[in-house]
Image: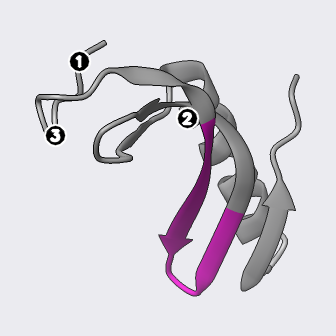
Amino acid sequence: MKCVVCKHGETQAGTATVTLERGTLTLVVKGVPARVCANCGEEYVDGPTSERLLQSAEEAARSGVQVDVRQFAAA
């Protein structure tokens, strides 16, 4: 797909590091499957992957975690 940010590059399969913040929680997830623009580096995460990231953040927030760094685990 064409990058919507730079409008020049094509995206390729790759991985991203996603940081989610809410209140006092900071969750960093490495190795997240994403489409990455070959020109500008913009990262696009699909809907199902986003849902899994948000579920992980919700679980971490409920358990009282303030800072957590995780590796993405495939389902």
Between discs 2 and 3, the one toward the N terminus: 3
Q: Which residue is mark 2?
A: 50
Is residue 10 positioned above or below 15 on the image?
A: above
- Is 47 colored magenta in this rendering? no
Q: Quadrant of residue 29?
A: bottom right
* Residue for point 79% across, 75% down: 68
Image location of residue 40, percent across then percent down: 29, 47
Point out the frontmost of discs 2 and 3: 3
Q: Amino acid at mark 3?
A: Val
Nearest the viewer among 52 and 33 is: 33
Q: Secondary structure at mark 1?
A: loop
- Is 25 colored magenta in this rendering? yes
* Residue for point 30% across, 39% down: 39
Q: Which residue is mark 1?
A: 2
Q: Secondary structure at mark 2?
A: helix
Nearest the viewer among 30 and 48 is: 30
* Residue for point 61% across, 32% down: 14
Circle on res. 5 = 3
Between discs 2 and 1, the one toward the N terminus: 1
Nearest the viewer among 8 and 58 is: 8
In magenta, the rendered stretch is 15-28
What crowding class fits label 2: few (fewer than 14 Cα within 10 Å), some (14-19), or many (20 or more)?
Answer: some
Q: Amino acid at mark 2?
A: Ser
